[in-house]
Amino acid sequence: MFWLTRIRSHSMAPALPDGRLALTRRLWRRTPVRRGDVVVVQSRELGQAVVKRVIGLPGETVRIEAGRVSIDGRALAEPYAAPSVFSDRYRVPPNHYFLLGDHRDKSSDSRSWREPYIERAALIGKLVGRGVSYPVPSGTPVPMITELPSARC
């Protein structure tokens, strides 16, 4: 199943600017989730759907030093990420994921959420087309394929 997700913040810019529509494919229970995937998450904590990038996989240690991310001691190349000054360390539990916005200093994500690790069941969709998005003016009627019309980043 596919649908269009409207981006509702600047946290994924510049790849996904506010107001853009992005083609999204449903993530079934057995669909693999990979580092770098941009996903739609149904957040219980925030009470809404959000769009973020998968950074940490189950069982990994994510370390952020002055905005630079490493996974289990190996630097992660992130050409999509804006510079940041944030530093911390996270150990991702089994069946959970660590998610970040691309515009790090403008993103509410795993670093700031009360529950930083997202269960696999909460990942409901994956943006397809390597960040392909469609500029559609806000308020323009768009036929939706599902009941998920927009997502905060």
Image (spheres, helix red, strand yellow):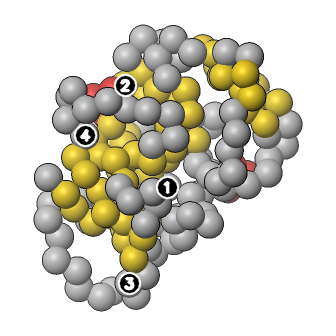
Q: Residues within 10 Å of mark 4 (few under 14, many from 20)?
A: many
Query: Dot 3 lies on which element?
Result: loop
Mark 2, other Cα within 10 Å: few <14 / some 14–19 / many ≥20: some
In this figure, which residue is indicated by the disc labeled 2?
119
What amino acid is labelled 4 in the image?
A: Leu
The three-letter amino acid code for the residue at tag 3 is Val
Q: Is residue 95 left or right of residue 28?
A: right
Q: CA gap, disc 2 to disc 3?
A: 32 Å
- Residue 84 in the image: state x and y as whole percent: 80, 47
Badge 4 element: loop
Classed neighbour count for the residue bearing mark 3: other residues with Cα under 10 Å, few (<14), some (14–19), many (≥20): few
Please identify, in this view, whether the residue under mark 2 or under mark 4 is nearer the observer.
4
Q: Is residue 18 above or below residue 140?
A: above
Find the distance from the CA under tag 4 to the CA under tag 1: 18 Å
The residue wearing badge 1 is 153
| Crowd class of label 1 (few under 14; some 14 to 19; many from 20; radius 10 Å) | many
Residue 135 in the image, given as x and y percentages of width and height: 43, 81
- Report the Cα–Cα distance between label 2 and label 4: 13 Å
Q: Secondary structure at mark 1?
A: loop
Residue 68 shows in this picture: yes
Is tag 2's residue or tag 4's residue first in the polypeptide sequence?
Answer: 4
The answer to which of marks 1 and 3 sits earlier in the sequence is 3
What number is the disc on residue 50?
A: none
Measured Cα–Cα span from mark 4 to mark 3: 25 Å
> Which kind of residue does numbered mark 2 sit on?
Glu
Q: Which residue is mark 3?
A: 136
